Amino acid sequence: MKNGLEVTIVGGGMITNDLILPSVYHLKRLGIVESINVCALNTPPLKSLKSNRELSEGFPGLGFTPFPVIEESEDRSFPELYREVIASMKPRQAVFVALPDPLHYAAVMTALQANQHVVCVKPLVLKYSQAEEIRKLAYQRGLFVGIEYHKRFDRRSLIARRRYAMGQFGEFRIGEAKLIEPYFYRYSNFQNWFTMDKTDPFTYIGCHYVDLVYFITGLKPVKVLVTGVTGRFPNGNEGYLWSHGRVHFENAAVLSVINGLGYPDEGAGGNEQCMTLFCEGGGKGSLIKHNDQFRGVTHSYIQPLGPGGSHFNFVNPDFYRLVPWEGSGFKPVGYGYDSVASLLGTIHRIEEACSSLDVPQALECRRGLLREIDDRGIIATPANSYINELVVEAARSSITREGRIVQIVYEPEPHIEEK
Ligand SMILES: NC(=O)c1ccc[n+]([C@@H]2O[C@H](COP(=O)([O-])OP(=O)(O)OC[C@H]3O[C@@H](n4cnc5c(N)ncnc54)[C@H](O)[C@@H]3O)[C@@H](O)[C@H]2O)c1
């Protein structure tokens, strides 16, 4: 493919602002992306993206086409507009789904039905059967679907995966993981969709670490128990604000995961996160221990510039930062950017390899590359990361029944069994 991709980002919220849009801007500089649409529910998030100073200083001369148009009244909502925007795209471009979790399925299916490749923020969907439907439709049409699990691209995860595969840790036996997002999230748009009937902290962020344990060890989860602690958002909506999950793996190993929306805004980190996996083999114990919050860099600013307004901060240089580079503005670096670049770069690569062939050959060419990507297992796809949908489905069934055990069964067809 000589030209870059047309990219439509559906959803203009926090993750679009903090990671996706700046990464896509940089990919436009590199020629992977040609044009950018952002479609939100209404104009306020689009206006914030347009007026974001960090973005305009970081990416001078770059912009996006907003849907709905910026001049539209702020209180009008357009929940179906993304369908029209996607329908108007050339075939086999890229739709980047960055909507609240419960809306992913409809948007991903809409994109596939319109012959578009897809990238979706995690979790892909909330049910295994939906992931399977997506996998089948995508493969039938030779379209890529990748899920943006950026922790996979953290170098420490990649190093651990390689060394685990080489047998240097023996076998994972027991571990714990933690990801507590800031308290101030409760005041954001979260309060409108993070309700008990739709999601919970384990589903929202616990899935990152379950995916990571699977990514590093290759072990499949077989049993899930999740208990929630409820509370009210400022608008009165009730949600699970904290959760504790226990995931059992096929070799009887156990992972304990705590999550929540409550890391102190005055705290030094943007959140609290870490993972320890105790392993054993060859008559010895071994471990993999990642401190994912404090990565050895501390800043104290003269103004309260921390994520929650703190002066003193732990700075994560590894996830996503804008840094000076040889070009104008700034460039994004880190595993968040690497992940977006890998996903959109893969779509570009598929099109480059196959688009000049005739229709049946091009389809076979794309399918061949999709099988390779699935087998390699670095990029999460519906075919190689469906354990996440099973875990999420099991977790939702468990947390809504106060921590009941839910089994994941893989034969003859993967499904969950509620006890
Ligand atoms: N670490 C991560 O991987 C990570 C981090 C944050 C968020 N996420 C995921 O990203 C997704 C979005 O999270 P967020 O924090 O950006 O949420 P958010 O609430 O800040 O933004 C949601 C956006 O969706 C838009 N929207 C809602 N309905 C729409 C519709 N029908 N059509 C078009 N736009 C619509 C809203 O306008 C808003 O801009 C979630 O699935 C979340 O799990 C992933």
Image: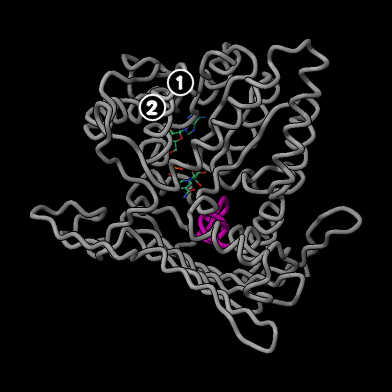
- Which SS type dominates the magenta stretch? helix
Q: Which mark is residue 31?
A: 1
Q: Nearer the viewer, mark 1 or mark 2?
A: 1
Residue type at mark 1: give it: Gly
Image quarter where the C terminus lies is bottom right
Q: Nearer the viewer, residue 31 or 235?
A: 31
**Sequence-wise, which precedes: disc 1 or disc 2?**
2
The residue sitting at the right extreme is 412
The residue carrying pointer 1 sits among few (fewer than 14), some (14 to 19) or many (20 or more) residues within 10 Å by Cα, namely few
Report which residue position mark 2 lands on: 25
Q: Is residue 341 magenta?
A: no
Q: Is residue 78 left or right of residue 329?
A: right
On the image, the x and y values in percent for residue 135 come to 75, 37
Quadrant of res 90: top right
The answer for how far apart the CA atoms under marks 1 and 2 are is: 10 Å
Q: Which residues are magenta?
A: 195-210
Q: Is residue 206 magenta?
A: yes
Q: Is residue 149 left or right of residue 14?
A: right
Residue at 43% of width from left, 28% of height from top?
27
The image shows residue 293, relative to residue 328, as above or below, that is below
Image quarter where the N terminus lies is top right
